[in-house]
Image: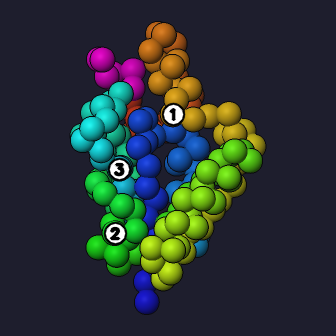
Amino acid sequence: MQKTAIFPGSFDPFTIGHESIVRRGLSLFDKIIISVGYNSSKKGYFPLEKRLEWIGNVFENEPAVEVTWFSGLTVDFCRKMNAGFILRGLRTAADFEFERAIAQVNKAMDNKIESVFLLTIPEHTPVNSTIVRDIIRHGGDASRFVPRGVNIGDYKL
């Protein structure tokens, strides 16, 4: 049976930390589905279509990675995609506490779905989408914090 993981997130934008988690996760899973969560009541900084395009660019030569979007509960999306795992990255102790709570609720909703956590590499610990957006919002160069293929400099807000 194929080991498929969902890597859910807003990815607004997708960072080098996200890329690292996916690339490292490929040694654990046969397939990783990067799924941009869509909430119609929230407005992302970058449009959903742009985020999907950028992530697709990053993994265009990686057949074990699929890029898509979903709305609703992650466990429902896992069932729909026949994924038995949810992949998440941890940067800090605060991340752990937040992710642990979500993982336990997900497990209560579907005990066949396992959450798998990978620690970020030390140099990516301070990188998150909120900080990257703040750099962009104030006219700074955030290119070192996003993977090749995420061309935020070409995007006009």
Of tags 1 and 2, which is closer to the observer?
A: 2
Range of residues picked out in magenta: 152-157
Query: Which x, y percent locates residue 9?
Result: 44, 49
Task: Compare marks 1 and 3 and give the one earlier in the sequence.
Answer: 3
Q: Mark 2 points at which residue?
A: 76
Asked whether residue 154 is in view, the answer is yes
- Disc 1 residue type? Ser
Determine whether, in the image, residue 93 is placed left or right of residue 118.
right
Question: Mark 2, residues whose alpha carbon is within 10 Å: few (<14), some, or many (≥20)?
Answer: some
Query: Which x, y percent locates residue 63?
Result: 37, 65
Q: Which residue is drawn at 43% across and 42% down?
A: 11
Q: Name the residue under label 1.
A: 129
- Disc 2 residue type? Asp
Residue 135 colored in magenta in the image = no
Task: Compare marks 1 and 2 and give the one earlier in the sequence.
Answer: 2
Q: Mark 3 points at which residue?
A: 37
Q: Residue at x 43, y 83 (%)?
A: 2
Label 2–label 3 contact, CB within 8 A: no
Spatial separation of the CA atoms under disc 1 and disc 3: 14 Å
Which circle marks residue 52 in the picture? none
Q: Quadrant of the N terminus?
A: bottom left
Of tags 1 and 3, which is closer to the observer?
A: 3
